[in-house]
């Protein structure tokens, strides 16, 4: 089914995150885009621009919902980093939405890196290091993060 395709990579990412989800492990999920969301709809799936827009909107909603689930599941141990590396005029709404959704329970960062992709990645690594520091006690031991049910604030 076409609508399930955008979340396959998120399903694979979740499996990997679960392998390293012990309490003292800081996690980073990184997405890069050139601002051309061609993967959000399949040519021929709809015949009109309105139909393609509708399908694109549904996919974006599904992606945001999956990021919300991952954020809820992994909490503050997870950083969702999204980097757009093309002209600012391109469409980075999916990346921005993913970072925004992650901020509910985790840390979400959208960065635009038209000129310097390395600098954007360095910013994400710095954020990850900060998370690792939070997960370490003053004595240098790894803290244990308890599994809790997280609810969205109203």
Image (spheres, rainbow, N blue to C red):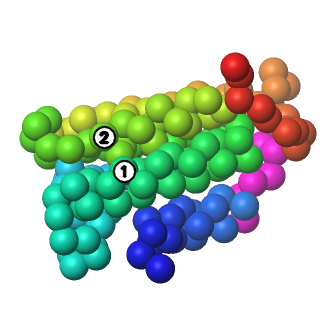
Horizontal side, residue 73 vs residue 81: left or right: right
Residue 32 in the image, given as x and y percentages of width and height: 32, 53
Picture residue at 61% right of the left edge, 43% below the top: 68
**Residue drawn at x 66%, y 67% as measured from the top left:** 15
Residue 54, quarter of picture: bottom left
Q: Where is 133 relative to 55, above or below?
A: above
Q: Which mark is residue 57?
A: 1
Magenta portion: prevailing SS class: loop
Q: Is residue 99 left or right of residue 15?
A: left
Left or right: where does residue 46 sit relative to residue 138? left
Which residue appears at 77% of the width and 32% of the height?
151
**How many numbered discs sit on the rendered protein?**
2
Residue with the mark numbered 2: 93
The C terminus is located in which quarter? top right
Q: Nearer the viewer, mark 2 or mark 1?
A: 1
- Which of the two labelled residues, at mark 2 and mark 1, occupies the earlier sequence position? 1
Residue 106 seen from this side:
yes
> Closest to the observer: 48 or 97?
48
Q: Marks 2 and 1: CB-CB under 8 Å?
A: no
Of residues 93 and 112, the one drawn nearer to the viewer in this rendering = 93
- Nearer the observer, 87 or 43: 43
38 horizontally vs 4: left or right? left
Alpha-carbon span between mark 2 and mark 1? 10 Å
Question: Residue 70: x, y in percent?
Answer: 64, 49
The picture quadrant where one finds residue 136 is: top right
Find the magenta span and give its range: 19-25
Q: SS class of the residue under badge 2?
A: helix
Above or below: residue 7 compared with residue 139: below
| Mark number displayed over residue 133 | none
Q: Residue 124: tell me if it is visible.
A: no
Residue 78, position as x, y percentages in the image: 62, 42
């Amino acid at each position: 089914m076409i609508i399930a395709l955008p979340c396959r990579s998120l399903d694979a990412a979740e499996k990997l995150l679960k392998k390293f989800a012990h309490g003292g492990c800081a996690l980073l999920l990184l997405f890069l885009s050139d601002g051309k969301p061609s993967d959000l709809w399949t040519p021929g799936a709809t015949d009109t621009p309105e139909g393609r827009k509708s399908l694109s909107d549904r996919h974006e909603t599904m992606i945001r919902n999956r990021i919300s689930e991952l954020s809820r599941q992994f909490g503050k141990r997870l950083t969702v980093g999204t980097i757009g590396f093309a002209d600012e005029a391109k469409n980075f709404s999916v990346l921005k939405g993913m970072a925004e959704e992650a901020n509910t329970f985790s840390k979400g960062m959208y960065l635009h890196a038209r000129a310097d992709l390395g600098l954007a990645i360095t910013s994400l690594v710095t954020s990850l290091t900060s998370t690792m520091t939070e997960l370490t006690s003053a004595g240098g031991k790894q803290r244990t993060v308890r599994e809790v049910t997280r609810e969205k604030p109203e």
